[in-house]
Every structure is written in structure tokens, then in C-alpha cells.
């Protein structure tokens, strides 16, 4: 048996080229498929959402507005103290998909005592929220 001749580096590179093209095409298809799914169905998760507006409906009833759309918001934290009221809202957050970002959600919060002069603090953002006396 005679030893097989060694292939040159150029010949080995030519043999690997179809493999690299195949892997590149698979990667492009995976990225394109993921982009289509995100744009058509969206990606959603439950998380705290910053409060964008608060309205005093009654002396002890607040309407809190969050920047989510049909996302079933609910109060995650309500801490009433004499000096302030701290609140956090949890809602479904969505990137992409139909209906994302084109409406707002409202959740009502009944306080144990009238809000009075106490500031309303959004725990998620750390901001003091201005409470509007009416819509």
C-alpha cells in the first residue's frame, strides 16, 4: 500500500466551504424565523409596570394607569403608611405582536384610609405620582 498523497491547504479549505455556507444559511433561517414569530405573536412576560397616571375616583379609591394593553394588571404591592402610600402594579409586558403599545390598562385600588395629603409612590420607578382629582 502506498501512502495517500497529502492534500494541500487550499484543497482542504475548498472542502470546508460548503459546510460553512450550510451553517450560515441555517443561522440566517433561524434568525428570520425568530423575527417572524416575535413580530406576529410577540413575546410576553409578567412583570411590574411603571404607573403612568393616577386618578382619585373617591377619597379612598384610586385608578392607576399602566402602559400595557389588555394585560390584566393587578396590584402587586400596597403599603399604606401615615407619611406615604407605596404601590406597585404587575402586568403582562409584550414586545411585538398585535395590539402591543396601542392602548392603556387601568387597575383600581381601594385604600384603607383616604389618600388625603399623602404622596403616592410608584415602587417600580421610585417616582412620586401626581394624583389627578378627575379624569
Image: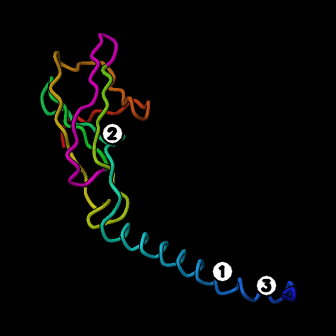
Q: Would you call the spot at circle 2 few (<14 residues within 10 Å), some (14-19), or many (20 or more)?
A: many
Instruction: Single out the mark in the foreground, 3 or 2.
Output: 3
- Secondary structure, mark 2, is strand
Verify whether residue 78 appears in magenta.
Answer: yes
Mark 3–mark 2 Cα distance, whole angstroms, equals 61 Å
- Residue situated in front as seen by the camera: 129 or 95: 95
Toward the front, the furthest residue is 1
- Looking at the image, is mark 1 or mark 2 earlier in the sequence? 1
Q: Would you identify the image quadrant in which residue 4 lies?
A: bottom right
- Residue situated in front as seen by the camera: 128 or 45: 45
Residue receiving disc 2: 51
Residue receiving disc 1: 20
Q: Is residue 45 left or right of residue 111?
A: right
Q: Is residue 32 left or right of residue 105?
A: right
Mark 1–mark 2 Cα distance, whole angstroms, equals 49 Å
Toward the left, the furthest residue is 58
State whether residue 6 is above or below residue 117: below
| Mark drawn on residue 126 | none
Q: Is residue 64 left or right of residue 24?
A: left
Percent coordinates x, y for residue 104 in the rendering: 25, 52
Instruction: Single out the mark in the foreground, 1 or 2.
Output: 1
| Mark drawn on residue 12 | 3
Give the residues in magenta.
68-84
State whether residue 75 is above or below residue 17: above
Percent coordinates x, y for residue 89 in the rendering: 29, 35
Residue at 43% from the left image edge and 71% from the top image edge: 35
Q: Would you identify the image quadrant in which residue 39 lies?
A: bottom left
- Looking at the image, is mark 1 or mark 3 earlier in the sequence? 3
Where is the C terminus found, in terms of image quarters? top left
- Secondary structure, mark 1, is helix
Amino acid at each position: 500500500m502506498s501512502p495517500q498523497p497529502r492534500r494541500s491547504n487550499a484543497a482542504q479549505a475548498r472542502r470546508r466551504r460548503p459546510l460553512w455556507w450550510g451553517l450560515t444559511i441555517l443561522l440566517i433561517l433561524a434568525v428570520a424565523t425568530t423575527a417572524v414569530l416575535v413580530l406576529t405573536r410577540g413575546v410576553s412576560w409578567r412583570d411590574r409596570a411603571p404607573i403612568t397616571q393616577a386618578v382619585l375616583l373617591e377619597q379612598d379609591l384610586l385608578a392607576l394607569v399602566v402602559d400595557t394593553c389588555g394585560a390584566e394588571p393587578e396590584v402587586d404591592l400596597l403599603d399604606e403608611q401615615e407619611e406615604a402610600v407605596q404601590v406597585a402594579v404587575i402586568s403582562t409586558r409584550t414586545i411585538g405582536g398585535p395590539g402591543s403599545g396601542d392602548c392603556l390598562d387601568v387597575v383600581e385600588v381601594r385604600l384603607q384610609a383616604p389618600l388625603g395629603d399623602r404622596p403616592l409612590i410608584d415602587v417600580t420607578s421610585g417616582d412620586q405620582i401626581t394624583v389627578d382629582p378627575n379624569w
